């Protein structure tokens, strides 16, 4: 276990989202989960894909360039360690807000696309919601959309707008195409303590 203590004049806190905020994620989700499944010997892949997915599990990329970005644009943020839906719920639970996540807006790595195209028992839902990604989920006012797009392109940051904050927590859902379905907010890793 590692603990870091520091000081900042501007902290992007959890529980500071606003109704109507856009929801964003950084990077790609799901690669680390497949690395863990390979390590558990649930299936095997080519040497190059095995190396890629296992490295995503053991050595997730922590993008420190996001610190300045989040201080400029984010209302609230959290890392995605336990899973997209669990961590999103943690981020807004205290405010009793809900969320809409558009599954089709979540872009996955080319390696994960390749894997999913050849392994029909897996789909995007059962790979991207499981955690260990160590990417960031954050919210920002919709007026910042073009600024976020410009900043991410200029600084070569992978940032995806995937949904929005809703007024009531019981309205939380995922859209896949035009199909809306309720979700299990506990999809991901749950700590047992």
Image: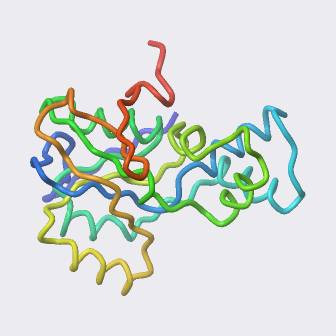
Closer to us: 41 or 166: 166
Please state if 35 lies on the left or on the right of 29 as rendered.
right
Looking at the rendered structure, the number of numbered marks drawn on it comes to 0
Q: In front here: 25 or 6?
A: 25
Up the image or down, 34 lies above or below 162; here it is: above
Residue at image point 38% right, 57% down: 25
Q: How is the image coloured?
A: rainbow
Q: Quadrant of residue 109?
A: bottom right
Q: Is residue 125 left or right of residue 88?
A: right
Q: Nearer the viewer, residue 192 or 34?
A: 34
Which of the pair 3/46 is nearer the observer? 46
Q: Position of residue 89 (x, y in %)?
A: 30, 34
Q: Quadrant of residue 87?
A: top left
Q: Residue furthest bottom?
A: 154
Q: Residue at x 50, y 62 (%)?
A: 107
- Direction front: furthest residue: 178
Tell me what residue is drawn at x 79 percent, y 38 percent.
39
Position of 87 relative to 52 (above/below): above
Q: Residue 76: x, y in percent?
A: 20, 50
Q: Please say if 109 is above or below 176.
A: below
Where is residue 127 drawn, in percent x and y? 60, 42
Q: Residue furthest top?
A: 193
Tell me what residue is drawn at x 39 percent, y 43 percent. Answer: 179
| Quadrant (top left, top right, bottom left, bottom right) of the C terminus | top left
Q: Where is residue 157 shown, x and y percent of the image?
A: 42, 74
């Amino acid at each position: 276990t590692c603990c870091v203590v520091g000081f900042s004049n501007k902290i992007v806190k959890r529980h500071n989202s606003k109704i109507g905020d856009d929801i964003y994620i950084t990077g790609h989700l799901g690669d680390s989960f497949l690395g863990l499944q390979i390590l558990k010997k649930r299936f095997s892949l080519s040497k190059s894909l095995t190396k890629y997915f296992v490295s995503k599990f053991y050595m997730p990329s922590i993008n420190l360039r996001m610190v300045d970005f989040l201080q400029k644009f984010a209302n609230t943020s959290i890392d995605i360690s336990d899973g997209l839906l669990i961590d999103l719920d943690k981020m807004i639970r205290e405010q009793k807000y809900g969320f809409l996540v558009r599954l089709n807006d979540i872009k996955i790595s080319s390696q994960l696309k390749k894997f999913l195209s050849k392994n029909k028992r897996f789909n995007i839902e059962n790979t991207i919601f499981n955690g260990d990604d160590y990417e960031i989920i954050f919210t920002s006012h919709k007026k910042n959309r073009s600024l976020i797009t410009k900043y991410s392109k200029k600084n070569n940051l992978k940032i995806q707008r995937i949904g929005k904050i809703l007024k009531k927590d019981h309205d939380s859902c995922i859209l896949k195409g035009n199909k809306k379905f309720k979700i299990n907010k506990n999809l991901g890793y749950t700590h047992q303590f």
